[in-house]
Image (cartoon, grey):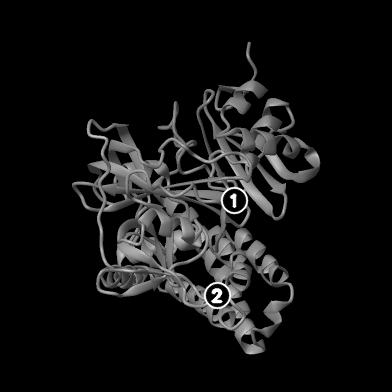
């Protein structure tokens, strides 16, 4: 008879655990974490496996395994992968017989997304009251962490910003780790992006940029305190910025609004290094809906990012939007190559795009970028060291940010005439990504270091 330990589910083999990993990087990262020296309070019982894994912080990990490869998992680490490396390591410990039976501790709650056989069992899926209690517990933990953050923010302003020129990373790492412990990984990411402002801003401008970023964090703290009084879309944005998880199934069920079936043109992509993760933003334009959509993926450096949608590709697909004010991120379903593969895109001048950016900031004060296509011509600076600009037909110009591509190829692609340039509009200017003109696509962008 097969050994069963969790609600009648046979113990998984190591091969089954490895096969459930989202990518090779997660498999490799999980193996060193099987060691007992990094685990405490681990065990198994009822429908669950649980344990606390010590790394840069101590993470609470809970897994509800079903018949392989079905599982549900939660972890307090900031990883957006599911299962994360800690959950995989816990499953490997189970497969190796290293989890003793025991009574489930109070912190080890059933993952809210548990599914598969037995989901009707009250021991596997908590009732609404239990779910509400877990949500309230998390919110209280986040609120306590944000109170600490607010005191830290006030200390930065009171003592002055000049000290930030010396070891800025050391100033944020402790409070960022505290935000991870408080289950606010989004805030941790924002904090770890602050030192980059000093590197990407000239010496006369970085104090203002840093103060603006600190004020944005303070605004986020205040918004969370008044979360229940906010409009639904803005409240969803606040939760997203803080790092509250949003289940994929909930997005597909319409949490962010009705789905949109459209013909989507992939106009550009930007790879970025955000803290300890690489990210890829693939921007899509809907021909019928006249709306932007964002495919966002993350990976540890060197493991490879999602390349299922290539720049220049045109798809017929259904987009399910994430909740939030001015939210562009989507999940795509029922995707297939469109019959008409000629891409479509909008075009606007600088003033019109600036107004759209103002509207996005009004909806989401923490926005850092907005997709746009400018019909403009590159303007060479009159003196060395000054920034390039893009000027539209009215002569209105926007600063061209360095990063995704060099300006000289952009000038060569335009031939000195107005062209449609896709890029990301932000508070400091416009990041040109790609010229939307046959035969003049810019080279693939190099990795950017961003907040």
* x and y, in percent, of residue 218 in the image: 51, 77
Residue 47 seen in the figure? no
149 is higher (above) or lower (below) than 336: below
The label shown at residue 277 is: 1
> Which residue is label 2 attached to?
384
Q: Are marks 1 and 2 in contact (CB under 8 Å)?
A: no
Residue pictured at 66% horizontal, 62% vertical: 177
442 with respect to 230 (left or right): right
The crowd level at tag 1 (other Cα within 10 Å; few <14, some 14-19, many 20+) is some
Q: Secondary structure at mark 1?
A: strand
Question: Observer-nearest residue: 344 or 132?
Answer: 344
The crowd level at tag 2 (other Cα within 10 Å; few <14, some 14-19, many 20+) is few
Question: Observer-nearest residue: 149 or 23?
Answer: 23
Residue pictured at 73% horizontal, 72% vertical: 167
Q: Earlier in the sequence, mark 1 or mark 2?
A: 1
The span from disc 1 to disc 2 (Cα, nearest Å) is 35 Å
70 is higher (above) or lower (below) than 102: above
180 is higher (above) or lower (below) than 264: below
Q: Which image quadrant is residue 416 in?
A: bottom left
Q: Residue furthest top?
A: 1
């Amino acid at each position: 008879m097969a050994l069963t330990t969790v609600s009648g589910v046979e113990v998984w083999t190591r091969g089954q655990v490895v096969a459930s990993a989202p990518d090779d990087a997660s498999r490799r990262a999980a193996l060193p974490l099987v060691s007992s020296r990094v685990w405490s309070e681990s065990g198994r019982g009822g429908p669950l496996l649980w344990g606390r894994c010590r790394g840069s912080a101590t993470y609470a990990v809970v897994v509800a395994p079903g018949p392989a490869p079905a599982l549900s998992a939660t972890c307090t680490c900031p990883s957006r992968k599911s299962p994360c490396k800690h959950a995989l390591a816990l499953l490997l410990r189970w497969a190796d017989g290293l989890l003793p039976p025991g009574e489930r501790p109070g912190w080890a709650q059933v993952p809210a997304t548990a599914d598969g056989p037995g989901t009707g069992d009250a021991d596997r899926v908590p009732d609404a009251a239990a779910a509400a209690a877990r949500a309230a517990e998390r919110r209280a933990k986040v609120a306590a962490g944000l109170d600490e953050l607010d005191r830290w923010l006030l200390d930065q302003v009171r003592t002055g910003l000049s000290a930030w020129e010396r070891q800025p990373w050391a100033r944020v790492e402790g409070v960022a780790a505290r935000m991870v412990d408080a289950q606010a990984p989004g805030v941790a990411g924002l904090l770890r992006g602050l030192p980059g402002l000093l590197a990407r801003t000239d010496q006369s401008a970085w104090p203002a940029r840093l103060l603006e970023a600190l004020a944005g964090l303070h605004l986020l703290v205040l918004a969370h305190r008044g979360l229940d009084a906010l409009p639904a879309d803005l409240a969803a944005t606040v939760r997203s910025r803080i790092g509250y998880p949003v289940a994929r199934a909930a997005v597909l069920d319409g949490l962010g609004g009705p789905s949109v079936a459209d013909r989507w043109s992939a106009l550009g992509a930007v790879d970025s290094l955000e803290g300890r993760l690489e990210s890829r933003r693939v921007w899509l334009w809907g021909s019928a809906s006249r709306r932007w959509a964002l495919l966002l993926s993350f990976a540890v450096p060197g493991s490879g990012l999602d390349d299922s949608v290539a720049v220049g590709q045109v798809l017929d697909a259904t987009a399910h939007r994430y909740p939030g004010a001015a939210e562009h991120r989507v999940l795509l379903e029922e995707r297939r190559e469109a019959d008409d593969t000629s891409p479509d895109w909008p075009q606007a001048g600088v003033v019109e795009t600036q107004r759209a950016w103002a509207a996005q900031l009004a909806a989401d004060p923490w926005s850092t970028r907005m997709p746009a296509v400018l019909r403009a011509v590159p303007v060479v600076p009159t003196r060395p060291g000054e920034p390039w600009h893009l000027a539209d037909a009215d002569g209105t110009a926007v600063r061209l940010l360095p990063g995704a591509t060099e300006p000289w190829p952009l000038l060569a692609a335009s031939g000195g005439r107005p062209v449609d340039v896709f890029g990301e509009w932000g508070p400091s200017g416009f990041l040109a990504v790609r010229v939307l003109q046959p035969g003049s696509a810019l080279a693939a962008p190099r990795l950017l270091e961003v907040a």
